[in-house]
């Protein structure tokens, strides 16, 4: 990368950061206006003109113009054009991406407290504590976004990612032994399956069959790691590989049933206020019904 390419990269990065934090753009614009006011001062303007006529001044001005005046508006994030409910999650992902890009060179500086990589990955060597924490946080956010996105858009992709997530992280967790907190790993798989069933379920026997197959596939590795990674290993009856998939499939089937029930209930009655209005309208046909007021009160209490 040459000098001008380096400047262009910095400019693009600046627009990327301003897209994440629009207030920085307002601050930069304010500072620029203050410099412009200073430049209009007669004394400053005279000295600036004399400096600009020198070879060094002309070179610096051209470099500054190349850096500042080139239009990189197309590289700026426009979060306001995205669905409002996705912006908070995407902002976190972008911020972590910036942190990884900027701080990665510092991870090999060797001036920060380090932890042995053997206990984390089985590899020899060491890494800075903060870099390990940053990578763990980034990995969790990235996989959460991938599972959630696939769960509301594509069933086959959701199942594949779910299995990959469970098996890859489960193999890493096995290095640390059994712990109650390891239950969070298969819980992530179960939650992702619940989200998929609630978002993509449709009426019909064919879709129910898809849900059953998905529950069996997702529950297979998740159930194994429920028993292998936690104190629940005591109920495996001597064979984790046999009973783990059974327990996992049962949990996924129950979650799928609940998700389909909630999805169907929401489709039949989009809002509570709508249900209340419908019931109130129907009960109004029986003005003399003594249970009318009681029923409406019970519904309001819900």
Image (cartoon, rainbow, N blue to C red):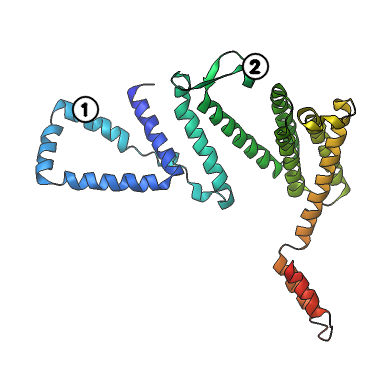
Check residue 180 in the rendering and tell me which mark sits there, or answer none: none
Task: Answer left or right for 29 relative to 208.
Answer: left
249 relative position to 31: left or right? right
Given residues 193 and 76, the one toward you in this image is 193
**Viewer-nearest residue: 105 or 153:** 105
Q: Earlier in the sequence, mark 1 or mark 2?
A: 1
Judged from the image, the secondary structure of the residue bearing numbered disc 2 is loop
Q: Which residue is mark 1?
A: 59
The residue that disc 2 covers is 122
Based on the displayed image, in which of its 4 quarters is residue 16 positioned? top left
* Residue 194: percent from left, percent from top: 76, 45
> x, y percentage for residue 257?
83, 48
Is residue 113 rendered to the left or right of residue 275?
Answer: left
* Residue, far right: 237
Query: What is the number of callouts on the image?
Result: 2
Residue 202 in view here: no
Q: Nearer the viewer, mark 1 or mark 2?
A: 2
Pointer 2 local density, CA inside 10 Å: few below 14, some 14–19, many at least 20: few
Query: In the figure, 56 relative to 302: above or below?
Result: above
Between 299 and 26, the one lying in front of the other is 299
Query: Is 276 on the left or on the right of 250, as rendered?
Result: left
């Amino acid at each position: 990368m040459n000098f001008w390419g380096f400047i262009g990269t910095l400019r693009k990065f600046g627009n990327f950061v301003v897209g994440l934090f629009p207030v920085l753009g307002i601050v930069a614009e304010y500072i620029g206006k203050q410099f412009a006011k200073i430049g209009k001062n007669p004394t400053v303007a005279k000295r600036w003109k004399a400096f600009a006529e020198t070879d060094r001044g002309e070179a610096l001005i051209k470099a500054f113009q190349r850096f500042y005046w080139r239009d990189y508006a197309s590289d700026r994030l426009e979060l306001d054009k995205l669905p409002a409910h996705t912006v908070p999650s995407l902002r976190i992902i972008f911020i972590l991406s910036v942190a990884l890009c900027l701080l990665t060179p510092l991870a090999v500086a060797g001036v920060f407290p380090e932890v042995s990589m053997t206990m984390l990955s089985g590899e020899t060597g060491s890494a800075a504590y903060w870099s390990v924490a940053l990578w763990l946080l980034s990995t969790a956010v990235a996989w959460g976004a991938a599972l959630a996105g696939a769960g509301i858009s594509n069933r086959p992709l959701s199942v594949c990612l779910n299995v990959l997530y469970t098996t890859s992280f489960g193999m890493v967790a096995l290095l640390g032994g059994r712990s109650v907190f390891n239950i969070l790993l298969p819980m992530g798989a179960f939650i992702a399956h619940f989200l998929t069933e609630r978002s993509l379920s449709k009426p019909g026997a064919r879709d129910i069959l898809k849900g059953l197959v998905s529950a069996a596939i997702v529950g297979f590795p998740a159930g194994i790691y429920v028993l292998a990674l936690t104190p629940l290993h005591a109920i495996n009856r001597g064979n984790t590989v046999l009973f783990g998939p059974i327990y996992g499939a049962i949990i996924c089937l129950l979650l799928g049933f609940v998700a389909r029930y909630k999805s169907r209930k929401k489709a039949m009655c989009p809002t509570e206020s709508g249900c209340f209005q419908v019931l109130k309208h129907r009960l109004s046909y029986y003005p003399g019904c003594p249970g009318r007021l009681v029923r409406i009160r019970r519904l309001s209490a819900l």
